[in-house]
């Protein structure tokens, strides 16, 4: 999976948040096909983060992956409501701190 993330992802007049978070909100029923797709996507992103963290030799790749997913989803949700550029940049800075901290413990 190739995923390009940058602070500009949450900027722009047409940005409406993460499509998967929006789908999950619109279809909260656990067995609805759209809900299942949204959940599977979020799990894939988390697993990708975990794989990258594991490859980097992070002590607890699961923890870092979960933290990064929280930051990503928070940026997507907040950027849709408030200043997407500002919160996108803040999310990147926070993610870098999490990664730096996890890698410093190697």
Image: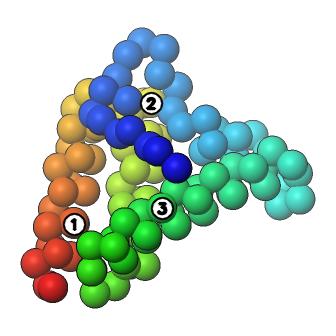
Q: Residue 18 sits in which quadrant? A: top right
Q: What residue did someone put label 2 on?
A: 80
**Which callout, 3 or 1, points at the residue further toward the start of the chain?**
3
**Which callout, 2 or 1, points at the residue further toward the start of the chain?**
2
Q: Are marks 3 and 2 in contact (CB under 8 Å)?
A: no
Q: Is residue 105 left or right of residue 23?
A: left
Q: What residue did someone put label 1 on?
A: 98
The extreme top residue here reads: 13
Q: Work out whether 3 lies above or below 59.
A: above
Whole-angstrom CA distance, mark 2 to mark 1, is: 23 Å
Residue 64 in sight in this render: no
> Residue at coordinates 15% horizontally, 85% vertically from top-left?
106
Residue 22 in percent (x, y) is at 64, 38
Residue 23 in percent (x, y) is at 70, 40
Q: What residue did someone put label 3 on?
A: 48
Residue nearest the viewer, comparing 26 with 35: 35
Residue 65 in sight in this render: yes
Whole-angstrom CA distance, mark 3 to mark 1, is: 16 Å
Q: Work out whether 89 lies above or below 67.
A: above
């Amino acid at each position: 999976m190739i995923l390009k993330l940058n602070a500009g992802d949450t900027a722009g007049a047409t940005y409406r948040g993460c499509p998967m978070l929006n789908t999950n909100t619109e279809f909260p029923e656990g067995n609805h096909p759209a809900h299942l797709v949204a959940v599977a996507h979020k799990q894939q992103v988390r697993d990708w983060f975990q794989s990258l963290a594991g490859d980097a030799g992070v002590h607890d790749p699961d923890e870092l992956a979960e933290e990064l997913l929280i930051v990503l989803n928070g940026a997507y949700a907040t950027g849709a409501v408030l200043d997407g550029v500002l919160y996108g940049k803040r999310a990147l800075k926070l993610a870098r701190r999490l990664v730096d901290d996890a890698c410093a413990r190697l």
